Image: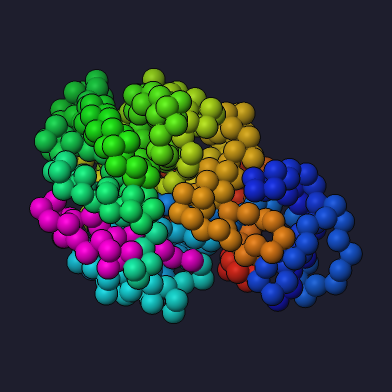
Amino acid sequence: MDILIKNGRIIDPDTKLDEKADLYIEDGKIADVQPTIRKKAKKVIDARGCYVMPGLIDMHVHLRDPGQTHKEDVETGSKAAAKGGFTTIVAMPNTKPVIDEPTRVSYVINKALQCSPIHVLQTGAITKGQKGEELADLEGMIRVGIPALSEDGKTVMNSHLYLEAMKIAAQYDIPILAHCEDINMANGGCLNDDEVAKKLGLPGISNSVEDVIIARDIFMSFDTGCRLHLCHCSTKNSELMMRNAKEDGQKVTAEVCPHHFTLTSEDIKEGNSNYKMNPPLRTKEDVDALKQGLKDDVFDVISTDHAPHRHAEKSGSMRDAPFGIVGLETCVALTISELVKPGVITPMQMAEKMSYNPARILKLENRGSLAVGKEADVVIIDPNAEYIIDACTFVSKSKNTPFHGRKVNGEVRYTICGGKIVYEAK
């Protein structure tokens, strides 16, 4: 289908274009971008008042497939992503069984080809079974197409083993997506280690649980030449260390998730485990540092850490409930409401952090761009649409979010993947 998008604000970090223009899609590619395009098309979209950006790329998604498909699966997760404006998602390997060898990578890839409206990429675990004892078949998984390695959900605490993985990642020039948590220091904590945790009588997770592993990983990436990407940064010192690493010219990138730049531990409602996530919600001082880091491009990426759990699992106590919230269907609105609308970042920075930069980190040469000839992955967003988040309308199988009932701005109107409309707002 040829598609003509009229009157939108084209925001393309690749070509540095930020102006009102038309965009024409033909044969699955960006065919033309001009101030005015006078062509007939089978589908004409009036994008007046909307952002037209490269399709969003989420580097941090849990699809729970295989093994926990009662929470999410490849099909429902990718459809939720399409509703959220994402045309590419990267699935974490902490499934059951763990994605730690080539046939399990192929399972996800093949299932996505059959049922996903968007691109689904599968990462490979660093150690067998994520037990931290022996390296997984890294080279085998790289050969079948993983874009990155990750032990997400855990940290490889054995530094010697991790060093060997970094050397292999550097050899093949693929990034390691690092979950930074000293499990010994965490010691069963469930909230940020502050006055809120003390008031609720719950064990805390200090900033240093995250910070010491960030420091270790940065130094090790420097020694090995490995491209390191820090997942879900949440502390003020993560911003400081990333700023220093960037100034030193190191191969380190990092992401922040919407919940960490939107909420603090003070927002936690007692007994509501939808506020339980890992890393935990931190203090205002941490949130302010994260926002400054996003503003100054210290942080390269906004990812969701979409972590679905069913209501029965999340309805228990804060101490016993699993960590994590869903995020694919709220990310755009929270980013616009908390960052773009208040002027923390520009719309161009939003497109960089949610599309262009992830594409460059993952070496997706035809994505993250609206340049002529590139793959027609496009999202159309109305930044002024105001509504209240309703978890009951989520496409995801799971509804675990602390943002239910929150008033926001920013609605995805269309998601186009490979020249096909895969989501259209009603």
| Observer able to see residue 5 | no
Q: Is residue 338 above or below residue 397?
A: above
Give how far across and how far down residue 164 sits, in percent. 21, 49
Indicate whether residue 23 is drawn in magenta.
no
Q: Is residue 73 above or below residue 48?
A: below
Give how far across and how far down residue 311 sits, in percent. 29, 55
Please tell me which residue lies in front, 254 or 4.
254
Is residue 20 found left or right of 350 in the rendered image? right
Residue at (19% x, 61% y) in the render = 136
User: The magenta stretch spans which residues?
Assistant: 119-142
Quarter of the image with the C terminus is bottom right
Residue at (11% x, 36% y) in the render = 184
Rendering quarter of residue 113: bottom left
Quarter of the image with the N terminus is bottom right
Structure colour scheme = rainbow
| Count of residue discs | 0
Indicate whether residue 133 is drawn in magenta.
yes
Give how far across and how far down residue 79 sits, in percent. 48, 66
Residue at (45% x, 26% y) in the render = 247
